[in-house]
Image (tube, coloured by chain):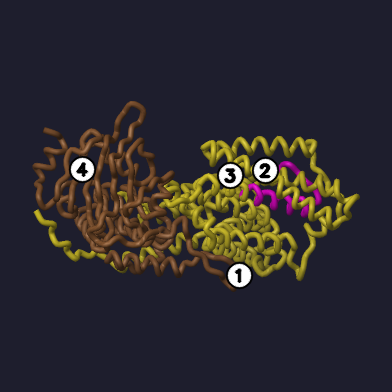
Amino acid sequence: MSEMTPIGQPLLEVRNLSKNFGPVQALNDLTMMVRAGEVVALAGDNGAGKTTLIKAISGVYQPSSGEILLQGKPVSFASPQEARDIGIETIYQDLALADNLTIGANIFLGREPMRRAFGFLPVLDRAKMAEAAKSTMALLDFHVSRLDAPVSNFSGGQRQAVAIGRAVYWNAQILIMDEPTAALGVPEQRKVIQLIHQLKAQGRGVIFISHNLQDIFAVADRIVVLRRGVQAGERRISETTHDEVVKLMVGG
Amino acid sequence: MTSPPAATSHVAPQADHADKARTVLQRVADLRAWLFLAFLIFGFEIWSRLSFGGTFLFNPFNIQSIAVFAVAPLLLATGQTFVIISGGIDLSMGFIMGLAAVVAAHVINWLTPGLGFWPAVLLGSLVAVAVSAIPGFINGLLVALLKVPPFIGTLGMFGVARGVAFLLAGGTTVPVKNEVFAALGNGKIYGVPYIILVTAVFVLVMHYLLGQTRFGQHNYAIGANAQAARRAGINIKWHLLRLYILSGMCAGLAGVLYAARFSAGAAQAGEPLLLDSVAAVVIGGASLFGGSGTILGTVAGAFVIAVIQYGLVFINVAPFWQFISVGVVIIISVLIDQAQRRFSGGRQSE
């Protein structure tokens, strides 16, 4: 895990990235950048290459050509685990949580802390997990009282917060969020948007994929529009409009 | 367009009393096996006092008989608990138990003349448990690497272990000629049979393994959401491989204790116990869909079955009522599980 990058400095750079599956060119010579404390929205129609791009950044796919730089250093990952280890975390749409476990257990899933009971017997350190759950959720302005309850007891927005909380706890620098609001009701969507603002204020970089332009305009600093695997345009949110973005997406 | 200021909306806290009612109901559902058990013991006690003028519960002989009765199903059921929590099932445990009993009998008979009583018992028991890891390992390979559904993979192993056990036994039971082994199987210390002590220690170890270690924690996670577990970096294949080896070895230990108790190895030793073990796990509160269950619940579940079986004999009811009673308890237990799920919304669709 690396030091936090000062806000405004380049955090993640994608240079001339291409990915093809056999003869199909899913991503063609794509270049983009995410700065610390910046939210970049990825937009585009189905099949535009958004998913391919984030899968390349998060280590699921190996790019066919081009490079990815984190804090100026070229990086490559053989697996999502390696990407996660250096601070690139993906929050999946279907929430990668074990519903039967507590918030703490989900935060630590796969890297559970241990302590020694009676001085010799290694046991799960549930107190540490609960403590981390409490402080992490508080950092995201979620105050949960029931740290011993399984996450199935919580609402969709709260579970989204747990998934984000896990990334934050493990000090993710870049959070890739794939349609984080798609499955939520309106008040919960607002809460997630608020969470993203907090991640931004903490100096993390967020790549935000959404079909919802309303959400994109509410939270993103920049928008990168993809069309058939190439970059169709890049705009600062403050200098563009819904109409322009839609035109970029459909072409014309 | 500027981003609207994030409103300080708090997610509406659920009504407190609804939350409490839910918690109480969940507790009751979690404890249902213990409630069943208390209810049964109470019922038999009343019956016993009314018809014989004697006690059921406070007779040490009854308690000991029930506990001895519960040993083998409980050993199978602890392993089965792990497998069922992971979302699988191990149908081969009954015949792995028989296989281990036959192997223990043969190896102890073979080693006793050369090594003497004690070393032969120790080595023979170890070999039998080690051998039972082999079908477990193959189950693990099938389920973890070859993606065979556990029901089918272990059903295949059910047949293989059964055949191998009968072949090794030559189609009959194999008597053990070793008095130390027989003494261990039937002896007592301070009135407590050794096999009960061994089982109690083993159950405690399994309770620790499930509740206090990463292995146990990952087992729950895999049962609830295998994809989430994989994304969290848990090596699911390696976990499942170890899991099925563990359940095989639980059956192996049950086989060794069986051979000690009866001074004989029999291929069919565990045949009627497999379904009892699954029943014990389900009565104990586990879901066959995976993700929930505890060792203590399973202990209660195993004792519910043992108390029904022993108690009905004790009060002179035709033994066939056992099947009916155990069946009814299983169905009630599953109904409670479903009601609780519906009420507390285990997996809400948003």
The chain identifier of the residue carrying mark 2 reads B
- Crowding around mark 2 (Cα neighbors within 10 Å: few <14, some 14 to 19, many 20+) is some
Q: Secondary structure at mark 2?
A: helix
Q: Do dots 3 and 4 share one subunit?
A: no
Among the two numbered marks 3 and 2 on one chain, the one whose residue lies closer to the N terminus: 3
Q: Nearer the viewer, mark 1 or mark 3?
A: 1
Residue at the image point whose x is 64% and y is 45% from the top: B93
Percent x, y of residue A69:
33, 49
Q: Chain of mark 1?
A: A
State which region is magenta.
B247-271
State the residue position of label 3. B90
Pair 4/1: label in front: 4
Identify which residue, B293 or A228, lies in the foreground.
A228
Q: Residue B201: tell me if it is visible.
A: yes
Q: Which residue is mark 2?
A: B134
Q: Main secondary structure of the magenta part?
A: helix
Q: Classify mark 1: helix, strand or loop.
A: loop
Quarter where residue A17 is shown: top left
Report crowding for label 1: few under 14, some 14 to 19, many 20 or more residues within 10 A (C-alpha).
Answer: few
Q: Which residue is mark 4?
A: A43
Cα gap from disc 4 to disc 1, whole angstroms: 54 Å
Q: Position of residue A143 (x, y in %)?
A: 30, 68
Q: Quadrant of residue B196?
A: bottom right
Q: Are marks 1 and 3 on the same chain?
A: no
- Helix, strand or loop for disc 3: loop
B94 above or below A161? above
- Closest to the camera, between mark 1 and mark 2, is 1
Q: Amino acid at mark 3?
A: Asp
Provide the residue designation for mark 1.
A120
Q: Nearer the viewer, residue A244 or A98?
A: A244
